[in-house]
Every structure is written in C-alpha cells, then in structure tokens.
Image (spheres, helix red, strand yellow):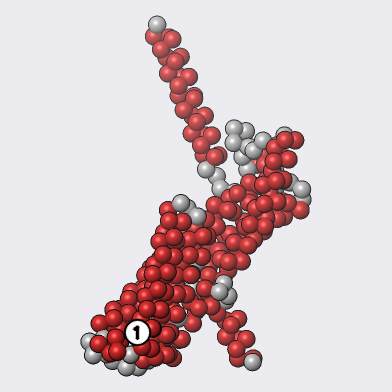
Amino acid sequence: MKRYTGLFLALVSFVIFLSVSSFSQEVTELKTDGSDNMNENFNQAEKPDDSYLAKFHAQVVVDKLIKRNLEQIYMLNVIVTNYSKHNWKGDYDNIYAEYKRAIELYYKRDMIFSRVWLERNQKSISDLMKKMAEQYNKDTQLILDECHKQIISLHLDQKTRSDPNKFRQLIDNQMRLRIAYGQMDDAEDEYTARNYESSLYHYRVAKTYGIRILETVAYDEGGKTRADGTQVPDVKTIKETYKIDKADNRNRIFQDVQQKSANQ
C-alpha cells in the first residue's frame, strides 16, 4: 500500500512540474523582432490551429483588423502628439511595432501568425485608448465646470433679463451645455461598455460644445468682471488655453494647424 502511495505522490509531483513548465511557456511574451516560427513562440497546447479552415478564418480576421487597427493608430498618433505631456509615446511606439510585425507576416502570407499579432495589437490599442478616455473625462469635466460657472453667473445677472441679446446668449449656452453633458454621458456609457474609441469621440464632441460656450461668453464680455465677482476670460485667453483641444477635436495635430496658419 505504501508503495502505491509513493507512486501516486510521484505522479502528482510530475504533473505539477509539467503544469509549471507549460505555464512558463504560456506567459513568455512574443517579441516584435522574434522568429516567424510558431513552434518557437508557443507550446503545443497553446499553438494556434494552422489547418486549412483556420487559415481561411484567419484571412477574414486579418483583412478586417489590418484596416481597423491602422485607422485607430492614426487616431492615437494625433492624440499622443497633441498631448505629449501625458507620456503615452512609449505605449504608442509599442503599438506601432506590433502592427508593423503583423504586416510583415501578412506579406509573408503567414495569416495565422499575422492574426495573432493583429489581435494582440488590438488589445494594446484598446488599453491605450482606455487611458486616454480616462484623461479626456477629466479634461472635459474641467471645461464644463468653467462653462456652468459662467452660465450660472449670467443667469443670476439682472441685466440678462432686460437685455435681449444677453438673454438669447443664455438660452443658447444652456442648450449647448445640455448637449455637452449628454455627450459626456454617452462617453461614459461607451467607456463602461469598453468601446473606448467611441468614448473618445463623444468626449471630443462634449469639449467642442464646452469651448464654444466659453468663446461666445468671451466675445461678448471678455475681460469684464460681473456684479457677482465672476471674471469673464478674454478671447485671446480662451483661444490660447484651448488651441490644442480645438485641433484635437477635429482629429488634427495642432502643430500642423499652426504651420498652415503661419504659411497663409
């Protein structure tokens, strides 16, 4: 009986050893400059299926992700360049390298391994967009906080009721603020659903409406201090403060916009 018990324990130990060994292979990260040979990158349990049917399905996935990932990388480049202070460049460079590796394999007609890299690339893109959406949330909230401060001050000003132009401005800005908060709600819903790209677009729309509110207030009363002590920023300050945001909202790199205006 003791002999069988010893044999059983030996078998259990062997299985545990194999499991640990297998796990160590599974967690090994693929390198963008690594081998094209799947056998050198995956253990036999985790190696992707390379049957004819698997290659057919991989071709469909690859054709879709090649276009989708590239469009998202273009968008990431705009955001990373505009907001370099947030140090997203390292993540972006890694995403670019992953996509480049996937394309190399695609042109070598290795659809199985190209799909592996494109799906990994899609995950990296999603992770970076999540970080960006969280920062956009903070930035948008700051803009809208300034908006409702100006609108509340305008609402409480006695002159607003007697001046048709000011009253019209109040009504228009109330509507813009309502739309901006609606877009922010949509952005948060998309974030919760893990649709981070859509979330970023909604935040951009919200920021666009918010900046428009501040611009209209500045054009009308820029540099003034209202009766309740609220200071209205001037047009120059608004343009300087939100110049990058305005370019980014249009999915443009600010430097390009600046150079274009300088050449005109």
Placement of 123 over or under 186, stated as above or below: above
Residue 133 x/y as whole percent: 45, 63
Residue 123, percent across and down?
54, 52
Along the viewing direction, whichever of 149 and 152 lies nearer the viewer: 152
Question: Mark 1 sits on what residue?
Answer: 167
Q: Quadrant of residue 32?
A: bottom right
Residue at the spot 70% in from the left edge and 55% down from the top edge: 103
Q: Nearer the viewer, residue 147 or 57?
A: 147
Is 134 above or below relative to 174?
above
Residue furthest toward the left?
Answer: 228
- Give the percent coordinates (x, y) of residue 199: 48, 61
Q: Amino acid at mark 1?
A: Phe
Q: Residue at x 77, y 50 (%)?
A: 108
**Residue 127 visible within the image:** no
Q: Residue at x 49, y 25 (%)?
A: 15
**Which is nearer the eye, 186 or 116?**
186
Residue 109 left/right relative to 100: right
Which quadrant holds the C terminus? bottom right
Depicted 148 relative to depicted 231: above or below: above
